[in-house]
Amino acid sequence: MSAAESPAPGAPPGRGALRRNLPPARRFLSGRKRALVRLGGWSLLESAQTFLGGYCLAQALDRGFLAGQTGTGLLWLAVAAASILGAGPPMRGVFTQLAELTEPLRDALVRRAVRQALRRAVTDPARTDDRADTGAVSRLTHQTEIVRDSFAGLVLTVRAFVFNAVGALIGLLALAPELLLVVLPPLVLGIALFLATLLPMASAQRSFLDADEAVAEGVGAVSAGHRDLVACGAQANAAQRTGRLVDAAERTSRVLARWAALRTVALGVAGQLPVLLLLVATPWLLRQGVTTGALAGALTYLLQALLPALHSMMTALGAAGTRLLVVVDRFQDATAAPVPPKGPDPDPDPEKVAEVGSPRGRCPSRTVPAVEVRAVTHAYGPDSPPVLDQLHLTVRRGEHIAVVGPSGIGKSTLAGVVSGLVAPDHGTVLLGGEPVTGATAQDLADRRVLIPQQAYVFTGSVRDNLLHLRPDATSGELTHAVRVLGAEPLVHRLGGPDAVLDPRGLSHGERQLLALCRAYLSSAPLVLLDEATCHLDPAAEARAERAFAERAFTDGARTREGALIVVAHRLSSARRADRVLVLDGTTPRFGTHEELLTSSALYRDLFGHWQHTPPPAGS
């Protein structure tokens, strides 16, 4: 929603939606006056049928059967029957003119949905790489059909009530004006009460739909980021956040139910009370000279014409009407072109970043290793060949390790085993000298942080997302993490640390950058990046790896070096590492870049492939 279309603070959403949609609705209807006039003309014939139904019955009783004139009574009934049989052509004309209204509306909405999707694709291409604009697809298919069907139903039911009411009220006036004194007040009161609930009902309907979509989006985000959440020990926070969304959906559902109950009361006042009052007032009406036939005709008008049409109109307006208002308003909301996301500013000299980021020359501390993998074997089934077979690996504190190999060779499996997310079939994994097996989720979260390729970002403030793993981090630490990882332009574009973050408005690279800042703030000494920078450009990736290679973590009152393991997808990541682990499915090789060029044929092949592969467009 653009700023110009946003409702004023405190304004009910239903009223704001009505104000936004009335001008285009008036323009649409004013361009189809001929269809409206023809629709009204055919509907007048329906009013005549309604009038004749009650009036002929009254005359058949008063002038025919009760007066001893059976033939006259049958003649009046024959006229009423003829009016019923002649209803076919008017209804055909009504539906023909209805199509003249509904089909152009559907076509206009389809064109608008296509324009919105094209505008979003042009202005925000990052969101269209492998995440289709599902909202545009829904508007193009499902929501346009909702609008067409709801609009057609509304036109039919409102038209039927209006013209049935005209015929019935004229008939009551023709039979006995006193009948209007009994029937009209409760009818008007019930309709007024019902109309007073329409806008609050639309507001409640929209709030309910928004809350329902928020639950679906929140659950989807948790499902997509489940590995990240478990790796970081953040299951309780995610469950609490999802629980708040569910509670909000429950509250909006209760509000919607209360308004629906009030609508039922309005239907009772307008639909049932006139019949009851007519029966109670029968003695008084007879004393006023109202005939038996007139009373029977009045009951016919109420039970056969007014009440069914009123019930249909209230049901349609209360359900289809509010749904129509909400869905059409979503077409209005989506007309605002999205602001194209800006990625982090590329470093003007990527080679310099790579050179400065290289930790070579640093002297890793000679204490307990950050990671020890001892004879680890793991397979994904009893009959499957092992992905990791008797693997030994030692990562010293302060060391930067890259893991390379063909796709599907077991790099992510190794990251899962080291982080404690995947239990190996055989062997032992130690983090800081302590075994991973048997450790609690919180204990693992305190010792390592894993960032997978699909970064988890949730709806909330930027600050909440960045401090998700360490809520007690200071503002200075947060600012330092954002600056050292080059995320300042992104945070500024989002509106600062306290701005509300909408994950749908972020590109994959921006999601990864926020997740990297979150991991940087963590107190865990070990960081595992499982292709966590694949959507960043090479300069931003180099800057992130440099920051993590030089990162310090808090250990009690001391500040010590952290360790970094990178599952690499670019040669530059391997070149920046202290040592490289090559997984080839048979005999893993572990050494420096120069050593592996001599000892590993696979690494030489990968090195040649990377060297001759052009960089991605836009890098």
Image (cartoon, helix red, strand yellow):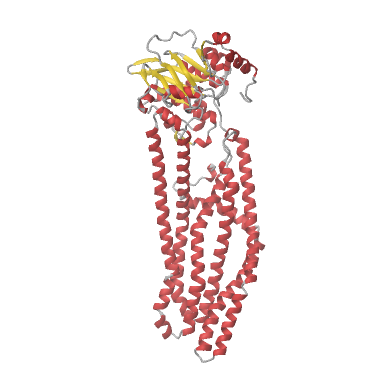
- Report the residue at 45% width, 33% height from top: 226
- Report the residue at 52% width, 72% height from top: 305
Q: Is residue 479 visible?
A: no
Residue 141, given in percent of the width and then of the height, sits at 60, 48
Is 100 rendered above or below residue 397? below
Q: Is residue 552 visible?
A: yes
Residue 338, given in percent of the width and then of the height, sits at 57, 38
Viewer-closest of 239 and 609: 609
- Report the residue at 65% width, 60% height from top: 100
Pick out the residue farthest to the front.
383
Is 544 rendered above or below residue 281? above
Is 598 rendered above or below residue 220? above
Viewer-closest of 526 and 118: 526
Pick out the residue farthest to the left.
557
Report the label total: 0
Residue 217, given in percent of the width and then of the height, sits at 48, 40
Pick out the residue farthest to the right.
34
Is 501 rendered above or below residue 581? below
Residue 229, given in percent of the width and then of the height, sits at 43, 31
- Report the residue at 44% width, 47% height from top: 10
Q: Quadrant of the C terminus?
A: top right
Viewer-closest of 514 and 162: 514
